[in-house]
Every structure is written in structure tokens, then in C-alpha cells.
Image (cartoon, rainbow, N blue to C red):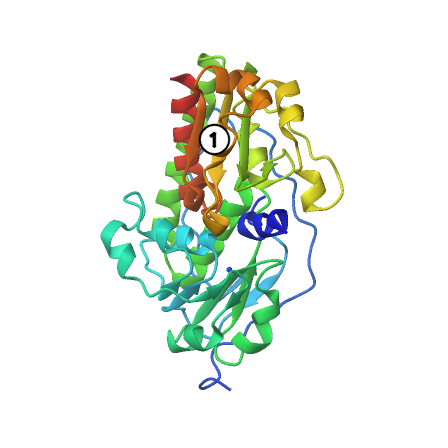
Amino acid sequence: MIRKLLAVAVVVLLAGCGQQGPTMVAATSQPRPAAPTTPSTAAPLASPVAASLSVTDPAGKRLTLERVPERIVCLTGLCDDLLVELGLVPAATTTPKLLSRPDYLGESGAKVPVIPGSFGGEDVVEIAQAEPDLVIGLAGVHDQLRAAVEKFAPLWIVEVKSHEDSVAYLRALAALTGRGAQQADAENRFRTKLATGLADSRAKGLGDIPVLAMYGGSSVGVNTTDDVLGGFLSQFFGYPWPSKGGGFETAQAYGIEEILARAPQVIFVQSFAFGGAKPVSETYREHPVWKRIPAVASGKVFEVQPELWASGRGTRAFGLILEEALAKAAG
């Protein structure tokens, strides 16, 4: 049961009501292009996208609105991330901790209304009361809300499988909102961070250091190379954590003994406090096998903020994660 709760928490990885709003038209999915395996050490300049009320997202689905969306409700952290990058503020959110970070909206982020309810079971009445022009949710989580939400606003379901998807969603939302200039600035900042980060990793030999990103409460899981966070980190560090196959629970279910066998020298931990659970590093502090892991023995286990590492998934989040990971791994 605990692992199922964790799966819901990180599934971004590894949230009759008035008049009819704008409509969304979905076309048949098209094959998505393969993302580059490694960022370039050069940072090409991005161009502003043209404004458009009809865009194709990274999954190949067409989204068409009747008017420019001014009030956007975010049910996933990717949405909040994209809006902040474009200089916009959500009409309502489900990730207030992300928005109120100083590198997002800070104190003003804490003033954004919060949609109550569980992740994937948000209060639809509250969503409607935010009077959205567009609602953005996460694939595999918010699909079930479509029938209820689309009585008053279109629901755009998003899914990030690589950081290039994040860039593509940034461009699509910039086109819908007419924020091409802000998109180009944000994209260029992100590309520069990727190029600088790759050069820094190579200069410091970090690509040869085994690194691990994991999550947990009373049990643990590993962000494998098949999920978005693990795949992203594998481009800058040694990252010997392939998917174990099967469903989510099986694919990422590395035990403490298996972690020891791969001997990570740096570990980043996202601790989820389900039922008042202790941080992972504290829970396993006296575990005899945990103590033998090189990162633990050398004091290189870092508790990181889940709202950023597990929820952001946009270009701003990936840039901040990269900066934090490189600094701590090299420190």
C-alpha cells in the first residue's frame, strides 16, 4: 500500500458548473520524436514561437482553444513551472510549496488559491469556482476528471518523458498565451544551464561518479533511467540504475542490498511524509547495510525538496535540480 501511495506521489516521474468554456480538439496521436541522449555543450539560441490558438503537444495531440487563456488552473507542477517561466501566475494550483519557493513566485506564490482534494481526486467544484479558461492536468492521473472539468473549461493532459518534452510544452503554452518573447528567454536560460552543466560535469569528472536519486517514506524506490528524473541525471553523472521491468512498483523497487551492490557515491533523497513517516536517511540511519553504502559512509546523502525534484518537471525545475545536484556532488 505504501509503495502505491509513493507511485501516486511521484508519477510525474517517475493531482453542470457554469457556462460552456473553450473547447479542446484532440487529433490522433503522432509518433513523438526521440529526445537527444545528451545535451549539447553548445547552447543554440531559441526563437520566440508565434501566437496560436491551436498547437500540437509533445504527445502529438492537437489542442485548439476559442480564445487566449487568461485564467489557467494547474493540477500538476509542470503547469505551474511553465506559467512562471512565461511570467504568468496560475488562477489556482495544487502545488503551493513549489510556487512559494523563492526561485518561483516566493511570497506571492503563497497567495495563489489552492485546489483541495487528493492528487487525481481534486475538488471539481473548486476548480470551477476558479473560473478557468484552461485546466492543465497530468496523464494517468487527471484523465478521469475530463468529463466533469470539460463542462466549464478544456482540460489539457500533459506528460513529460524527457526534458525536451518540457521545452516543447513551454513552446506550446507560450503560443497559446502569446508569450513568445518570454518563452525564448526561458528556453535560452535553460539551454545555457544544460550546456554549462555538461561542461562542468566533464571538467570535474562527475560523469564517472555513481549517483543515485531515490524516494520513499517507510519503503524506498529508485528513479531509474527510464523515468524522467533518472534519465535527466544520467546525462551528467554515472547513473547505474536501469528499470527492472514490469509495472511502476517493480521497475523502481531496488532494495538496500541492491543499492549497496551498485555503490553510489552520492545519493539524493526525496522523502515523502506519508502518515508522519521520517525522512529516508533518518529511517535507515542505523540499518547495517545502509551504513556500508559509500555515499552514506562519506556523508554524501542529501535530502532534497520533493516539491522541486518530484513535482516541477518544467524547464525551471530541471535547471534548478541540475545546479543543486552538480554543486552537492562536487562539494
Residue 198, position in %: x, y? 47, 23
Front-most of residues 279 and 34:
279
Looking at the image, which residue is at 55% across and 65% down?
63
Residue drawn at the location 39% of the way across and 45% of the way down? 184
* Image coords of residue 150 (percent x, y): 54, 76
* Residue 137 picture location, percent across and down: 52, 61
Q: Is residue 288 visible?
A: yes
**Which one is nearer the viewer's eye here, 246 or 143?**
246
Quarter of the picture holding the C terminus: top left
Amino acid bearing label 1: Ser
Q: What residue does disc 1 label?
A: 281
Instruction: Please tell me in which quadrant of the rendered image residue 249 appears.
Output: top right
Compared with 199, 78 (above or below) is: below
Q: Residue at x 61, y 69 (%)?
A: 144
Q: Callout 1 environment at 10 Å: few (<14), some (14 to 19), or many (20+)?
A: many
Instruction: Specify whether residue 265 is in view.
Output: no
Q: Judge left or right: residue 249 versus residue 53.
A: right
The residue that appears at 42% across and 43% down in the rendered structure is: 308
Find residue 78 and report its horizontal and vertical position in percent. Answer: 47, 52
